[in-house]
Amino acid sequence: KSTDLTTNLIYVFFCFSSFTNFHGAILHFKIGALTMTILDHEMKKYGLWTEELEKKRRDHGESSLDFKSSDDKFGVLLKKQEQLFRVAIYLLFNIAENVDVEAKMQKKGIVSILCHCLCRKNYELQILVVSFLKKLSIFKESVADMHANDVVPLLLPILNVEERELVSISLRLLYNLTFHNDLRTSMLSSGLVPVLASLLGEDYQRFICLRILYQLSRDDKAKPTIAKSGCLPTLMESVLECREEACGLEPVAIVINLACDPTAAELLGEARGIRMMMKKAFMFHDPLVMKILRNLSEHSKLKPLFLDYLPELVQAVISLDESSGTQQDKKDLLSECRNRKEPMKASLFKPGPMDDFEGDSFLDEDFGDETDEGAGSNKGEDFALECLGLLANLTLEDLDFALVLSDLNLLSWLQSKLNRGLRHFEDDLLLEMIRLIGTACLDEKAALMIANCGIGATLINLLNSHQEDDEIVCQILGVFYRLSCHASTIKTLIQDTQTPAYLVDLMHDKNKEIRRICDATLSLISEQDEMWARRIQAERFKWHNSQWLEMIEVTDQQSARTPLGLRESGQDFCRAYYDSEEDSENLVMAATLLEDAAGWFPSTGNKPSLGGDKGALDSPLDYFGNLGMFYPGTTEDAGGISNTATQILRHSQGDQPNNEPSILRQS
């Protein structure tokens, strides 16, 4: 009943809780549970106070003396209660060093109490409550309670206060919460991104704000919001103006994520910005900046802006490879690329020149040595990998890739790299090389060059060695599909490689995308080659009617094992041949499937029919003989299978010829 007395008593136990040695005694006498009960009681008192004050506001108005007196009294009680809250929560915070005790507090609703205290305007109480919530936020059960109590909207007003320590600890709590999808969604809907953008200018809060933005930028729904929040200029300034090789990773990582979004890419993809990022990337061989450019190149509107940098990108891929030779060889290759760049720009596009960007090549500027002595081989390989991925993204139908492959020696490099083989940890490089080959095959001349140089056979070998990697298999099949789209290359694909056979084997793969590409490629091959068209049709029939074919095979095996004899009078044929009524029903289904399958081949001559007289069958031997055209070896057993099928059809309709031998079950 006395708030002052309760506060003083709890303060005594709080002093004890400052020392770990007394925690056992505090827990033994259940001081923590008693303290939480007191807090819960004070919460209920606060609710009654607010209801009473609101009632007087409605009855008497804010200008009445009665309301003013009650309001002043409420303010005094509120201050005393906040002091009690501060001491009690501090006591619980100290004994929560034990994880088991903390779990008990969570079950008793400590998170709800703390979230309620966030609405108070007492600075010392707020910083204590936020610190406690931050401590609890590493447990998923507590995070679920915070989400249920709408902790994110309660924290937003705190971010606008002047006390930077309170703002900092609140941001760190939010950072812990960003690892949960539901709370990231709550942050977006609550308007957290503009608040974070405004805090980026403060050095004290910048680091944690960048980390929160990075976590949010992982969600596709958040990327447009971040791009429109006004933080892009600050982020790009951090990426471009850093003169050191190793800058902060957070700004670059955020821009990498945002570059995947069309809205953000449109803001980032200005010609001047792309040029500055290219300059920065080549100056330091920075794979992260090049990854930004690679992500930007995925958008169709921005692809033409990268055409001016094709020679430099190809040179980077070749010169950073370990097989490129000595440093002098790299310098000679760079000089050759510079000399070839101008005539290439003039003939890069088939219809005519397209040079949207003015200015000389940034490679003419003095950046020092092309390879940095302090950069490791891994960094160089990562940079080359990103350049290769950027080239693979330039899927422009009007781009003359044949010129790129021949004039810049890219085709010979691809051949030597694939033929020499890659180490097991270079699958990423292999994947990007296959993607680049597939992109080049959009150009018919380039596709013909690739088909004639023997890369198709190499891809078949890679398909065998990487059959467990669905991504590599899918990209290789994409190359075959694009080769099949050109009349000049599909014949080479069919006659000189085993591609159709591999496609037939993969047409029923468990991966949906692989099946889709196989079906599309096989359809193109069927239009070009009649022999493969029949085989592909037979394979599709076999897969579609696999259940029927299995039943025919089982019937034939049982017929071979069962002795022939005279049928006893009145004995049912199906019971004599099969063991159950379910098998008898399967006979009828097999007969129906037989007729449906026959109708599937309209050009195979006579087909079995159930029309006309009961039990009539139109030359089933012709059908099974024609089936041998698609399945070699089936013709030998066609007579036996057809006789069995004839019996099935007749007896399923009740026809019992008098002189027909019966099949009896062995005793």
Image: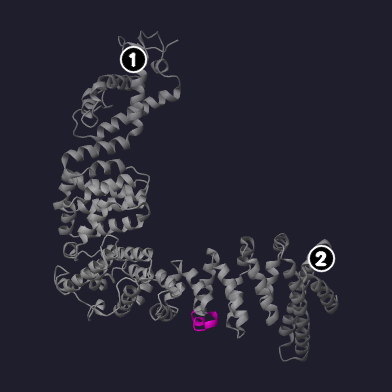
Label disc, if present, on residue 412 of the rendered structure: none
Residue 200: in magenta span: yes
Q: Residue at x 21, y 35 (%)?
A: 602
Kindly report the secondary structure that dominates the magenta region of the rendered protein: helix
In the rendered image, which quarter is residue 313 located in? bottom left
Residue at 72%, 70% (x, y): give it: 93
Q: How is the image coloured?
A: one colour
| Element assignment for label 1 | loop
The residue labelled by disc 1 is 656
Is residue 251 shown left or right of residue 91?
left
- Which residue is painted at 60% across and 86% down in the image? 162
Mark nearer the viewer, 1 or 2: 2
Q: Which residue in the protein does label 2 denote? A: 26
Q: Compared to 540, does 134 lie above or below?
A: below
| Comes first in the chain, label 1 or label 2 | 2
Disc 1 packing (10 Å; few <14; some 14–19; many ≥20): some
Give percent across and percent down for residue 196. 51, 78
Q: Residue at x 18, y 70 (%)?
A: 336
| Residue 324 located left or right of residue 548 | left
| Highlighted magenta segment, given as a residue range | 197-205
Point out residue 656 in the picture as x, y percentages from the top left corner: 33, 14
Q: Hey, which quadrant is residue 393 in on the image?
A: bottom left
How far is mark 1 from mark 2, CA to CA? 94 Å
> Label 2 sits on what residue type?
Ile
